[in-house]
Image (spheres, rainbow, N blue to C red):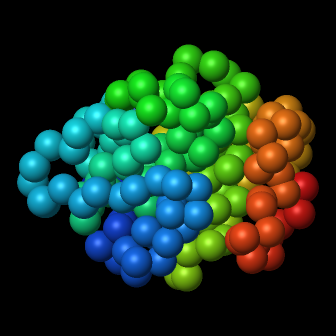
Amino acid sequence: MGFEADAPVVRLRDIDLEQVRHLLGLFSLQLHMVVDGNPIPGSYWGECEAGLIGSTVYCRGDTPLHSLLHEAGHLMVMPADRREAVHTDATDSIPEENATCYLQLMLAEQVDGFGFERACADMDLWGYSFRLGSARDWFLHDAEDAREFLAAQGLFPLPPTLTLQPSAEP
């Protein structure tokens, strides 16, 4: 991915963690905050990137919010039996990865002070790459496969327990 650890993206220290805990809880996931400076358990990319072990997403205050939403999205799209066994590496499935990226952008609308547009910008700054050149363009014009994958999982549109009002319609 080639991320820039010092990129000016929204970090967990910048948002209301209780709101994120609640969001993850809607999907039976937990958030575990690691002491700043300590390694993040289950982090595939290392540095400040979120980590996965079972149904828990591990983060620090300097973890980018988009990273937390991405890793949580992996857990949301996978079957329960895989979820409990996951440690660090969520998948090598391209359809699942695409669905996770799409879901993280949908979930961004659920976090005050973040939202779809900022999540797209942060993903672009971090080094996510899409055929159309940006996260926003991919989401709006090239993500039918991701929507179909999420629909098959019952995640598109998002369950009614969430009050998603997308700022961008596909």
Please determine whether, in this image, residue 110 is positioned above or below residue 30.
below
Please determine whether, in this image, residue 155 is positioned above or below residue 152.
below
Foreground: 109 or 139? 109
Q: Give the residue at x 78% y 39%.
A: 153
Q: In which quarter of the image is residue 105?
A: bottom right
Quarter in which the C terminus is drawn: bottom right
Identify the residue at the far front of this view: 81
From where the camera sits, is residue 104 visible? yes
- Left or right, 21 with reference to 61: right
Foreground: 138 or 157? 157
Task: State the image coordinates of residue 144 (x, y, percent, origin top left).
Answer: 89, 38
Foreground: 14 or 93? 93
Task: State the image coordinates of residue 163 (x, y, percent, origin top left).
Answer: 75, 76
Q: Quadrant of residue 128?
A: top right
Q: Give the residue at x 81% y 46%.
A: 154
Task: State the image coordinates of residue 66 (x, y, percent, origin top left).
Answer: 49, 56
Quarter in which the N terminus is drawn: top left
Q: Quadrant of residue 42?
A: top left
- Left or right, 154 with reference to 100: right
Task: State the image coordinates of residue 124 (x, y, percent, origin top left).
Answer: 56, 50
- Left or right, 77 with reference to 42: right
Q: Give the residue at x 22% y 44%.
A: 40
Q: Give the residue at x 18% y 56%.
A: 34
Foreground: 118 or 151? 151
Please determine whether, in this image, residue 87 is positioned above or below residue 158.
above
